[in-house]
Amino acid sequence: MNKRIILVLILILSICSCSSIKENLQSPVSTYLSSKLSNNDTIIIITNKINNNYAIDLFKTRSITPANINTLENSVILKDPTFHEKYWDIMNKKYRNDKTNEIWLQSVFWDQNNFKNIKIKFIEEDAFPKPSTYNEYMTEKKAEVTVFAFSDPIFYKNNKYAIFAKSETTTKKQFIIPNSIIIMKMKNGKWKFLKEINDGNYY
C-alpha cells in the first residue's frame, strides 16, 4: 500500500514538473507583455502571428554586424547572447517556416488563452487600419490605444534564451510592420526581459 502511495506521489510530482517546464517554455511573450503594462491598460493585439523567419534572420544579422560610431543604439547584439553558428543552425532548422516567407501568417493566430490578466481586443492584420487611408481611429473622439503584434517564441542555446519578433504602434500611428526582436533569458526558472534589438527601420 505504501509503495502505491509513493508511486502516485512521484507521478503527480512528475506531471507538475513537466507542466511547469512547458509553461515556462510557452510564456515568454505573455511574460514580456505583462511587464510592459499595468493591470488597467487595454490594448489591441494583431491576431495574425508574425512569421518566425523574421526573428531568426534578424537575430543572425544583428549578431554578426560589427558595431562602429555610426551604429544605432539597440541595433546590434554585442554579447549575451553570444552568437554561435551551431546553435543558430539548430534554431533555424527547428523554427524556420519553409511554407512561406510572408510577414503575416494567415492560419496561425493569437487568442486570449495565450495571455494572462491583460485586457485585450483582438483584430486581424488585414482589418487593422492603415495610415494611408482615413479611418475612425484618426478622429479625436477615439482614444489612442497601444497595439502589439508578435511571432511565436523561438528558443536558442538549449532553451536558455527565448526570441520573438515584435511590432508596437498605436491606433493613431497605425504602422504595424514588425521592426524588432525581443530577447528573454531564463533566470531561476522564470523568463526575464534581456533586450530589444531593432532592425534599423523607424516608423
Image: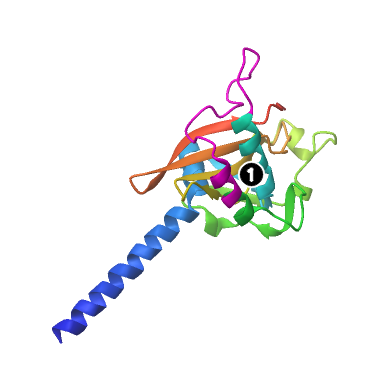
Q: Magenta region, mostly helix, strand or loop?
A: loop
Residue 200 appears in view: yes
Magenta residues, as a range? 65-90
> Can you say which quadrant of the picture contains the C terminus?
top right
> Can you say which quadrant of the picture contains the N terminus?
bottom left
Looking at the image, which is closer to me, 77 or 34?
A: 77
Looking at the image, which is closer to me, 21 or 122?
A: 21
Label 1: element kind: helix
In the displayed structure image, the side of residue 92 where residue 162 appears, left or right: left
On the image, the x and y values in percent for residue 38 come to 46, 38
Farthest-out residue, left: 2
Farthest-out residue, top: 69
Is disc 1 surrounded by few (<14), some (14 to 19) or many (20+) residues within 10 Å? Answer: many
Amino acid at dot 1: Ile
Residue shown at the point (46%, 50%) measured from the top left: 158
Magenta run includes residue 69: yes
On the image, the x and y values in percent for residue 179 come to 68, 34
Q: Is residue 26 above or below residue 6?
A: above
Farthest-out residue, bottom: 1
Residue shown at the point (63%, 35%) measured from the top left: 180
Magenta run includes residue 192: no
Residue shown at the point (25%, 78%) measured from the top left: 8
On the image, the x and y values in percent for residue 34 come to 47, 43
On the image, the x and y values in percent for residue 130 come to 80, 38
Q: Which residue is mark 1?
A: 56
Residue shown at the point (59%, 20%) measured from the top left: 73
Residue 147 appears in view: no
Farthest-out residue, front: 86
